Image (spheres, grey):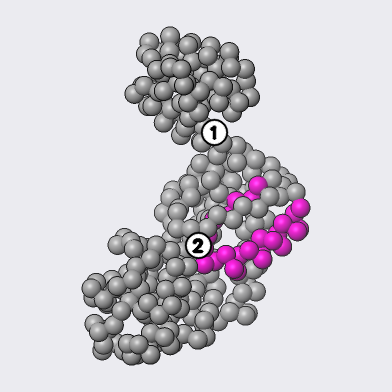
Amino acid sequence: MDQWDEIRTAYHVARAGTVSGAADSLGIHHATVIRHVDSLEARMGVKLFQRHARGYTPTEAGVDLARIASTTEEQFAQLGTRLKGQGEDVSGEVVVTALASFAPRLTPVLAEFHHRHPNTVIRLLTGLRLFRLEYGEAHVAIRAGSAPQEPDNVAQKFLNLELALCVSPTYVARYGMPTEDTFDQHRFIGVDDAHSRAPFARWMNEHIPSENITFRVTDDVSQQQAVLAGAGAGFVVRGEHPELIEVMPVQPEWRSGFWLVTHVDLHRTAKVQAVLNCLKDAAVEWVKSDPAISLPD
């Protein structure tokens, strides 16, 4: 642990560039910072910093050490999240990840969960990034597409979401109405990821000429906004925007399955089970009012 303290100190010196900056960050005396760095350099037999009037500049060895220490410190912090989730009470951080477009449905549910469990702090992380549950980056991940394959994760079917290929009236007024026979004469909105797992993305790659995919996006919210703006035909949740026009009948392969994913070490904890039950109850209610949502078979 003494050696880790020294490595951690050196990392903060590299990040701050000064002894005083590292001391403030760590909450220790500047003399302790200097002692840690000197001791670590002596033990390793290599110079980690060039000392000068403006502060400390890491050498090549110092840069390597700082990079590794940064990852280690991050993993220690994530481990803390995992350990805090293993208690029998429902308290502390509750970290849930989902696609950004799912936030309007999800936020009221998590708000109600917070009201029921006032000792919790809710963190809703949205985007396409797959958060590493094994490092404690999240308690529950809501993921779309095919079944997650990570061996240490528990994946449960959550719900299905019907998507439709739509255009806006603005697009039709400018370019006409696309039909299955005229796809090669129209513009389409696609994802900027050739390896996307989304079923609709695979369908588009197979049925739409690549030169006709003239507007590409990196997330589902941008895709929806591009369709609304008339950039082309693209996929949106069926019925979510009544003003849009469906290009063709909904295809079974456009259906997107969603999964509730947890790490095996936290899956049975009281907090994670409480979140899972809350989300499953919400899905049942969503089905009653949203024709685009169905429960898995």
Report the disc number at residue 198.
Answer: none
The location of residue 196, given as percent across then percent down, is: 35, 62
Q: Residue at x 43, y 77 (%)?
A: 229
**Residue 113 is inside the magenta segment:** yes
Please tell me whether the stretch drawn in magenta is mainly helix, strand or loop: helix
Q: Which residue is drawn at 66% across and 66% down?
A: 108
In the rendered image of this protein, does residue 290 appear above or below residue 279? below
**Residue 60 is inside the magenta segment:** no
Three-letter code, disc 2 = Leu
Can you identify the residue that label 1 sits on? 76
Q: Depth check: give the residue in front, 27 or 84.
A: 27
Can you identify the residue that label 2 sits on? 99
Residue 246: name its quadrant.
bottom left
The location of residue 250, given as percent across then percent down, is: 41, 83
Q: Residue at x 62, y 20 (%)?
A: 28
Q: Residue at x 50, y 43 (%)?
A: 134
In the rendered image of this protein, does residue 20 appear above or below residue 149? above
Q: Give the range drawn in magenta.
A: 93-118
The location of residue 120, given as percent across then percent down, is: 71, 50
Disc 1 to disc 2, C-alpha distance: 26 Å
